[in-house]
Amino acid sequence: MTPGPPVIRTPDQRLRIFVSSTLKELAAERRAARSAIERLHLAPVMFELGARPHPPRELYRAYLEQSDVFVGLYWERYGWVAPDEQVSGLEDEYNLCPPDLPRLIYIKDPAPAREERLTELLGRIRNDDHASFKYFESAGELEVLLEADLAVLLAERFELSRAVASSPTTAGTAPAPAPSAATSLPVPLTRLVGREDDIAAVRRMLDEGARLVTVLGPGGIGKTRLAIAAAGDMAAHFPDGSVFVDLAPVHDSAGLTRALARALGVRDTGDAPLDDKVTTALRDRRLLLVLDNFEQALAAAPAVTALLAAAPGVAALVTSRSLLRVGGERSYDLGPLPDGDAVALFVERAHAVRPDFEVTASNAADVERICAALDRVPLAVELAAARIRVLPPAELARRLDRRLPLLVGGARDLPERQRTLRATIDWSVQLLEPSERVALSRLGVFEGGFSLEAAESVVAATVDSGADDADTLSCLAALVDNSLVRQHDDVETPRFSLLATVREYALEQLEKEGALARTRDAHAAYYLALGDRADPELEGAGQHAWVMRLADDTGNLRAAVRHLLDQRDWERAAHLAWSLYVYWWVSGLLGEVRGWMERPLASGDPLDDRTRAIALYFTQAIAFWQDHGGTVVEKLTESADLFHRAEDPDGEALALISVALAMLASAEPDPTAADGAMATSLGLFRDGGDRWGQAMAHVMLGRVALLRQQVDAALAQFEESLTLARDNGDELGVTIAQHHRGWARLLLGDPAGATSDFAGCLALSVRLGHVEGVAYGLEGMVAVAALAGDVRRAGHLLGAVRTLRERTGLHNAPAFSFHQLFVDQMLAAGADRDAFDAAVTEGRGLAVEDAVAEAQGHA
């Protein structure tokens, strides 16, 4: 069967979301649904958006046939049954929903007066395998759930359509589901020219069982592109996928561990050595690590072999300019391109700047001479091809013949091909305007890419004559045109990056100018200001957007802090760490921050009160459950006192929350003292109007109440926290409050309410990328399944969450979770232990997204 032509929609034809519900009783919820749908730039299909002169049944049948997703909202009313009809319009809409339409169903609870016919309808819907089924309590909660579910649904449909489009399937045969792998290979913007024999050789080494393969070659020879291509072809050999790790900013084994942790999604919460967490995350997986730019981290080579010894199913494909020189290493020397491939690469890259360029009888010799002069090194060929827009091949070849020998001869400490590449970069740079050369050197301080705004700030602050934004933008455009800077168009906000070799060159130029320290100062100043802008947004409605934005700049944030610490600028380093507290927490990087803040405390330098307060907080608050010396409460109390002396009431209040946690976690918990600390904390947050802090404080007061077995009082505290967090638009706060309220409800005998809370926690945590929240939500659903006696589901989810915690480094963290109590009760009541253990084993192989889907499907 030949597929038809693709559907091309005009801009007004957005995906249509049909919303079904009774009108009056759910008016607020319909408004919330419309808001969620329109925020995703989709089209809500709702009767109140336009009356039409047709009978109702014909109208909603026509609307349904033209819609793409069905959303059902239900509470207590079944709806009006028209004369001569057997069912209400509400049920008829569900009955008429086309079978291929995705169905998202949301039930409002509590519903003490739910009509019997609606209960029957909901029972039928609940048994419908095509429908997603969730509970909610308020219009605000519905809005969050619907937006998140629609976003996930669209992503799934996009992936499915891409799979169908990219692989031929016979008519009537569904494509196989994608494997559950952790693949994170970059997708290059240009195709790889040539290298088929090289890819085959590297693959052969891995197929033969080599577990450490190093692709050797000078910068710009194409090692990274080769490794990505080879790894992409190894899916059958490594069922858990391939993970790409950029080591360009890494210089030691600690940096290697951090880079691995970030690529693997392992959280550095500070409760255990990060290298142990990475080993735990890898030990049972069959996975290929692509370690790129290893030459800057050769001291960490023994750490790689230790990791491979501990994880027998893992192999490493390394790119480096130098051998690692460790046991078990096999190397592959990557040489220049063959003549024909070098010419083909030149032509392809030339087309990017001059689409009509072709090799002809009159210019073929010149193109071949250009490639030969550049030793057929791919990056050098690309840089030269970028000049074809202004220089014809004959002139380009003449200039290269004249310029390169002089440049190559001046760097005798480098391998020949590396000298050629550096000479080519130098030649390309010399052809730039002076302002463009200056801009390029300044961009060398960025790590992991940068935004236009960041580039404008740093360049303007370090150019003596001053540079406005227009100057920087034009310089950046010229650098992109000349292949010295890469632009990444796969994100909403344009970002740019430099290849490692070009960045190295830029930093050398900065040092020659004597401008390196000043430029690093400007770089740190920009990220300090960014942190100040992010600080209030991270506690409110802008939280999700800022977490995503800061994630792109994690390398730059690290570089800024590192520079400030190296300058012994303890005050500004602590300030930057403190302003981004919520980001470090959500992203699982508090362990790394702890390491930063140990330096000022160990320096012996006098510290102002606020700096010492921040350093004490970060080094003690994340270790309150490991108080082997019995000093954590004392030091956190000192932190709170210092914040008080520094006239920082929010800092004092936050430190008092950690004081209370430490008191509760000590060998002899002191709930009375913890209650006092929390009461002071809550008062400080209230006086300052800090709703984020108030929400956190109420959660802690609820924990104290639970410790005293005052579950009703705890529930009231958690509900107050949830209200504050929702009003503030704080998604992290909502997940925390919902999770805690779920346990209180379960302990009070309300499994339906607890299920709704745990499902809401799961949905928001997935949206926010808060892995710890996902783990807590899944554990809540384990308890719900165990309470219901569902052995298979409880085991499935428990196995999945154990694997998730191990693979993300959260397995040693203290869990405010009671799921094991409910599992033990289920087994003690006579549940089949063998079936449960088998389900746990099966669940351990479940991908986290599948575990979440299974949990939410039973919500």
Image (tube, helix red, strand yellow):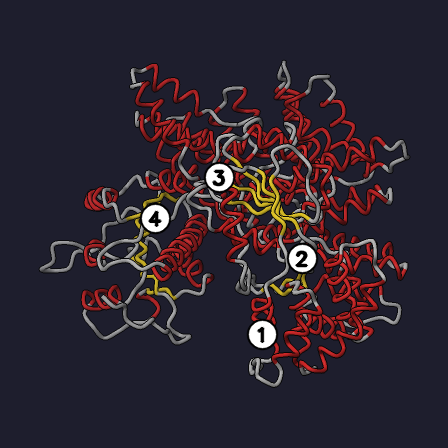
Sequence-first tag of 1 and 3: 3
At numbered mark 1, what does the secondary structure look like: helix, strand or loop?
helix
Mark 2 against mark 3, which lies toward the viewer?
Answer: 3
Residue type, mark 3 in image: Glu
Pointer 3 residue: 208
Residue type, mark 1 in image: Val
Q: Are marks 4 and 1 in contact (CB under 8 Å)?
A: no
Q: Position of residue 434 (x, y in %)?
A: 82, 73
Residue type, mark 2 in image: Gly
Q: Are marks 2 and 1 in contact (CB under 8 Å)?
A: no
Q: Is residue 851 left or right of residue 525?
A: left
Label 2 – label 4 distance at C-alpha: 34 Å
Q: Are marks 2 and 4 in contact (CB under 8 Å)?
A: no
Q: Is residue 306 left or right of residue 761?
A: right
Label 3 – label 4 distance at C-alpha: 28 Å
Sequence-first tag of 3 and 4: 4
At numbered mark 3, what does the secondary structure look like: helix, strand or loop?
loop
Pointer 2 residue: 449
Sort mark 1 into few (<14), some (14-19) or many (20+) by Cα contacts within 10 Å.
many
Out of 559 and 165, give the one closest to the viewer: 165
Pointer 1 residue: 347
Mark 2 against mark 1, which lies toward the viewer?
Answer: 1
